[in-house]
Amino acid sequence: MQVRVRYAPSPTGLQHIGSVRTALINYLFARANGGTFVLRLEDTDRTRFSEDYVKNLYDTFEWLGFYWDEGPDVGGPYAPYIQSERFQLYQEHAMRLVEAGAAYYCFCGEERLAGLRAAQEGSDSADLGYDRHCRGLDPREAADRVAAGEKAVVRLKIPLEGSTKFHDLVLGDIEWKNEDVSPDPVLLKSDGFPTYHLANIVDDHLMRITHVMRAQEWIPSAPFHIVMYAAFGWEPPQLVHLPMVLGPDGHKLSKRHGATAVDEFRKKGYLPEALVNYVSHLGCSFEEGRDLFPLADLERLFKIERLNKAPAVFDYQKLEWYNGQYIRMKGDAELRDLVLPFLAQEGLVAEAPSEAQRSFVLSAMPLVKERLKFLSDAPAMMRYLFEAPPLPAAEEFISKKLDKARAAELLAAGAALLSACDLSDLPATEARYRAEAERLGAKFGDLMAPLRVAVTGSRVSPPLFESIALIGADEALARAGKALASLG
RNA sequence: GUCCCCAUCGUCUAGAGGUUAGGACAGCGGGUUUUCAUCCCGCCAACAGGAGUUCGAUUCUCCUUGGGGAUACCA
């Protein structure tokens, strides 16, 4: 069987971790089986739709680095791939169900529904949801009222008795008593647009989708989707319900857990490789004894059987670790290009960096690569390479071991030695400093500390000699001089 | 409330009747190191509980408990 899967986001918000995970799993399944991955825009909620979200969708996936074989932008044999452009189709199919007696017009207004809900909440009755008030209306009369312009929705008739069963490739057989299925869900809204339920069944069928892979939150609507397929006389696709992604508190991942929009991760300086690698492993495993999987390997290794049933908690710390791993795997030039925008944002380099800036930043990469957790750490970590740090407070020079006078003495010695050293010869430079430390009866680290603070503005910094080699001995000397003066 | 799904270290997971229950992140402790980081080594840490089935259950069944999800003219 030719596998065809789809990612069907609703452009009513920014692309977030949960939906991207669904997209990724669908994509990997398609790739692993030589199938087709389809993007379909489910823009049927006209009240929440925004073109900005469509743009965000495209930006997100371009950044993440995986793409669809068919979709609104690339086209395909089942176009259009935007549901608002398929409006007529849903109308026709809804009519089909009404005419077949599988669905009916409902004229209940918002007020009636709200009252119903209030009454149900107040009572101890187990009944919840629509009371099927219009189900018994005469179809002909109903049709006349609609023809006369009365507002109506179309509802699906859920059988009053019996049960509906389906097979899920991860969860196995699932059976629902029809009395527990949502009572007659709306298929066509009063604005004429379909609900997700109608649109997704019609399109999945028309687009020959073979596997529907979506989060477990959809399980409760699966039974009436099955009812709908039967009403149309269609063969339903394979159902695959993916484990939910939870926040650290065990609830469905949402904004209140921190960053959840892919855009936020991008702005924080996460690498798409890290995000993809990490997210692919939420509720899914690939191969034992290994943690780092490039996208190509995920595509090759993915198996439905390796999908988990239990929900997974999103662990920001582990994602951070992945990010560090992928940063360290970058070549200097590539990392430089990734870091440049972050430096530009802080004004350390021009928006369009000069060749000199580019090569300067390139040569600084070895100093920061293994220290960066996020690309966004770069400006703070590298600022001293671009400009003299503010004069450090005297306490910065003084440690448990060094008092002010001793710190000043070591700083002076360290600075003095600088001009005598060839900074392009690191081992030799270090040897000279070690000898100097010994001569002064100090530890090597103690000799380095005050100089480090003077030059970098901090007790913690990338390697000192390499840093000085980058900014130049003159600049380092100038900073040391100022610091020395401040120490009196 | 009702229905549904789920259940191995704190977290992500491996395990598919017999294992010292493995790995990763985090945590803790060491080592390397010019600070930090990287890197290396070690430690801590789990089969929710109870009945069955079986010679033998983490693994199969049932119950309990716990967690999550759904209960919209949103997806």
Image (cartoon, rainbow, N blue to C red):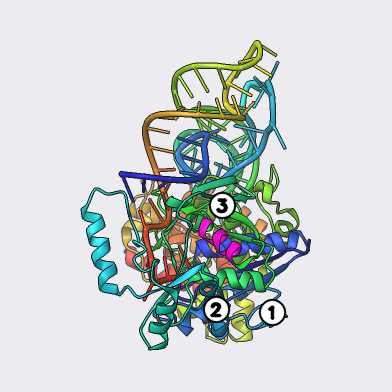
> How far separated are the C-alphas under marks 1 and 3?
31 Å
Local crowd size for mark 2, using a 10 Å CA cut-off: few (<14), some (14–19), many (≥20): many
Measured along the vertical axis of the image, is residue A185 above or below residue A401?
A: below
Q: Which mark is drawn over residue A90?
A: 2
> How far separated are the C-alphas under marks 3 and 2?
35 Å
* Contact between labelled residues 2 and 3, with CB atoms less than 8 Å apart: no
Q: Which mark is drawn over residue A86?
A: none
Q: Which residue is mark 3?
A: A282
Local crowd size for mark 3, using a 10 Å CA cut-off: few (<14), some (14–19), many (≥20): many
Under tag 3, what secondary structure?
Answer: loop
Residue range (magenta): A223-231
Q: Chain of mark 3?
A: A
Q: Is residue A227 magenta?
A: yes
Which quarter of the rendered picture does the C terminus of chain A lie within?
Answer: bottom left
Q: Chain of mark 1?
A: A
Which three-letter amino acid code belongs to the residue tagged 3? Leu
* Contact between labelled residues 1 and 2, with CB atoms less than 8 Å apart: no
Among numbered discs 2 and 1, the one appearing first in the sequence: 1
Query: x and y percent of residue A364 in the render?
Result: 60, 69
Most frequent secondary structure within the magenta stretch: helix
What residue is shown at x 47% (from left), y 63% (from top)?
A157
Q: Which mark is drawn over residue A78?
A: 1
Which three-letter amino acid code belongs to the residue tagged 1? Tyr
Q: Is residue A186 visible?
A: yes
Q: Is residue A473 visible?
A: no
What residue is shown at x 55% (from left), y 67% (from top)?
A468
Along the line of sight, which residue is nearer the eye, A194 or A450?
A194
The reply to whether label 1 and label 3 mark residues of one chain is: yes
